[in-house]
Image (spheres, rainbow, N blue to C red):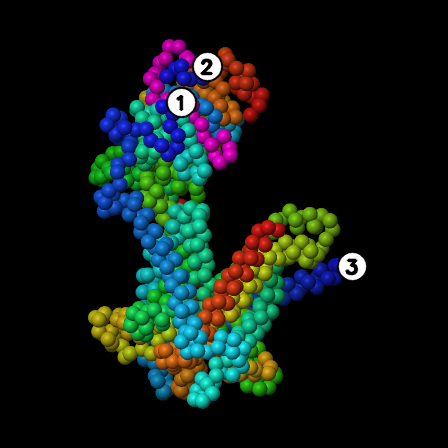
Amino acid sequence: MIVKNGESSLDHKTVNRRLIKENVSYRTFLSRNSENRGKILIFICASLIMAATMSITLFLTLQGIRSFTVDGLNPIKFLTGIHWNPESHQHASYGALPFIFGSFTVTILAALIAAPIGIGSALFMTEIAKTWGQKMLQPVIEILVGIPSVVYGLIGLSVIVPFIRSQFGGLGFGMLAAAIVVGIMILPTVASLAADAIKSVPDEWRQASYALGATKWQTIYKVVIPAALPSLLTAVVLGMARAFGEALAVQMVIGNAKVLPHSLIEPAATLTTMITLSMGHTTDGSVLNDALWSLGLILLIMTYIFIILIRFLSKRGRLS
Amino acid sequence: MLTQLKENIVYPEPKKQNIIIEVNELNVYYKNNHAVKNVSLPIRERSITALIGPSGCGKSTFLRTINRMNDLIPGAKCQGEIMYDGINLLDKKIDVVALRKEIGMVFQKPNPFPKSIYENIAMPLKFAGIRGKKRLNDIVEESLYQAALLDEVKDRLSQSALSLSGGQQQRLCIARALALKPKVLLLDEPTSALDPVSSAKIEDLLLSLKKQVSLAVVTHNMQQAARIADQTAFFYEGEVVEYNDTSIMFTKPVYKKTEDYINGRFG
Amino acid sequence: MNSNKANRMSIFLITCCAVLMAGILLGLVGYILYQGFSHISLRFLTSDASAFLAGGGIKNQLWNSFYILFITMLFTVPLGIAGGIYMAEYAKPNKLTGFMRSCLEVLSSLPSIIVGMFGMLVFVNFFHWEYSILSGALALTVFNLPVIVRVCEDALRSVPQDQRLSGLALGLTKWHTIKKVLLPAAFPGILTGLILSAGRVFGESAALLFTAGLSTPNLDFTNWNPLAPNSPLNVFRSAETLSVHIWAVNADSIIPDAKQVAYGAAAVLVLCILLFNVSARCLGRLVERKMTGK
């Protein structure tokens, strides 16, 4: 009587039934503490999460392409046009390029601000002052992460905008102010992820480098940073994803001009600020409303692109 | 049944106790690793069976197969027969939850729940359907007494089990298993994480438990096997090399390999 | 010599980065508290906001913030913990689990304004709940869910494997083991994560703009009937939260003391979030100490 896994040779009539599983019936579901009931509840919740994600993507896509399918806007013109003039009756034009340009410029500038400071702080925490640096900066990072974006916006409005105004002239509102605000906002995200990345570089490599007579900086520059590079990039890209989607803090300091700006200190707009400002004032189903949903769709697509980029980078990180 | 067993197993004569679990030609695979090879072994009632052998020889895997803890490891496959009370425990219709109440297990590292001492024992009882404060109290007290822990903890049953010392924690784990009134208790190196004094207490405890339950103990410690076991099985590379009465095994081992291991020449 | 100089130089620069970051935090929190503290008074906290006169308070906004937070947690905690249990204990390494993980990744990286737009589309327009606490709380649930799932999954995974084994070896079913052994053991971690995420929800604004609205009806704090339109408990009324208020008074309000109100409200907001931060840590540690008896 040799039995393989998954087969049964038990005859219910003959052997004792103490250890034999009962048939699953509705009673096992109704009884409190039932194994199946817990399992079913868990699976319902999990499928709800999946359904939510799918419906967000689906609904926003359907709503976002309405301006092209229903209102007949030309997608190419929408993406490359530089005039956003929905109010004009004869020549209403919907060119989203200024906002796309604004979003990308602010994001890249913010990353340029946050990446060096963030990675520098991470190096300080992990390489220079391992114990007390960690103890000091960890809470700083955690508190900074928790500060709401409107507070960053408020600080930008009352400190950074006047500062730019006094230094460079103009109004002070513009992409530079927005980039500084968002850069500071994503700084803690970049710093904490970068610290994790650097921590995961094995200590033996550092010791090998020191044993060869390298200085601390040479070790950091030649050994630690190259080894952690894909993860460091992931940290920066994650920060950029956050910067790209930030709405209110940017809206408060960018000046909200619906044109392509000529310099960093002129008022401009981004995808998020346009949605923030106009969405509440449009009527459902109007062309402007649909065009705003299309801006939202661009945001959604960018989110997916960032996710794919992060996946690609983290796969690279694992290989090396 | 005896004819099916491998011929290199010498049976102790006369047999003192009945066989409670009879394992026949058991094979366990982890993905590509053949961890237990064609093992046939009896576990006798009201006695201690020690499983010895170098680490990685399959003795722990063998032990975990008996109460189906191996089900939890993805990719583990079992073949063969583990006869207990007239049924094959490897059958898919076996209710593993009920099975584990009858065949208890104690692990290498003491692993009490982060709850009070009382709750550690009472919680599994409640799930086994035992109700009533009085009854629960009685069983908790009785099993703590059996595990020789009652005197040490009776004034602080509501304290966290993690405040106990390592040896006390392990005895609590044994008490917790005993509370379910198992027929068989499987112990996977129960003393290897403990200091010598605590180990000695656990050994005494196991000897006293022999009167009520059948025990199978995996151990690294040869002296321990010699001290407490009635029968001993020597595992090597997934196979049982030799199985015999402990007294015979440690004085006149049949196989060279057994002798070498017992004398500490490898492993 | 040259490499030594470069070494010292770079270490100096790295230290500067760290000092800069710490400085930013101190400056930020210090500035807000300094500017706002003079404006925080009992009257500011307990009087209604004013539409065009100076001297408005933030009573309703403060209440709305906490109430929306409460309703959000009511939805997120069970769902998120269930999701965490699924990911840590039930998910087998297959396609479905991979998909679930991708879904959580997408949810957690969605910009909050997108979540707000989705909330507007589904809860406000489709279900006709209008700008309401319910719509806002559901949008925030979407926003907060991936965080809680992650927290719960991590906390469960950090419970030692032998706890799982000991539960099962004692004849507990898998569900019982999760419910009675693993969840209690993971509780301190889950609690800390929950409170920290509550701070995030409390400060969120963009997702609420199009779901909970920019206005609050005249609330009657003596009317606790949740169905009355002016009851603070009514979930079908619009509600401006504290952080939305900060944005709104700056963006398009005509009250003369907009700056002061914004600073005062921001100081209250930051204080609340610091409080969440500190209490998360203290409570987590306290519970852990109680459990381990040390």
Say which quarter of the image contains residue B98: top left
Q: Which element carries disc 2, helix, strand or loop?
A: loop
Whether pointer 1 and pointer 2 mark residues with C-beta atoms closer than 8 Å, the reply is: no
Residue on which disc 1 sits: B24
Amino acid of disc 3: Met
Q: Chain of mark 2?
A: B
Q: Name the residue located 22 percent from the left edge and 39 percent from the top edge.
A: B131
Is residue B23 one of those drawn in magenta? yes
Q: Magenta segment, which residues?
A: B9-34
Against B59, residue A317 (above or below) is below
Q: Which element carries disc 1, helix, strand or loop?
A: strand
Q: Name the residue located 43 percent from the left edge and 33 percent from the top edge.
A: B77
Residue on which disc 3 sits: C1
Say which quarter of the image contains residue B211: top left
Q: Where does the image place residue C64, in percent across and percent down from the top left?
A: 33, 72
Q: Where does the image place residue B119, in percent across and percent down from the top left?
A: 31, 41
Q: Quadrant of the N terminus of chain A?
A: top left
Mark pair 3, 2: CA separation? 78 Å
Q: Where does the image place residue A99, in percent across and percent down from the top left?
A: 51, 77
Q: Chain of mark 1?
A: B
Q: Chain of mark 3?
A: C
Q: Name the residue located 48 percent from the left edge and 71 percent from the top edge.
A: A298
Is residue A222 one of those drawn in magenta? no
Residue at mark 3 shares a chain with residue at mark 1: no
Against A306, residue B105 (above or below) is above
Residue on which disc 2 sits: B7
Q: Nearer the viewer, residue A300 or C264?
A: A300
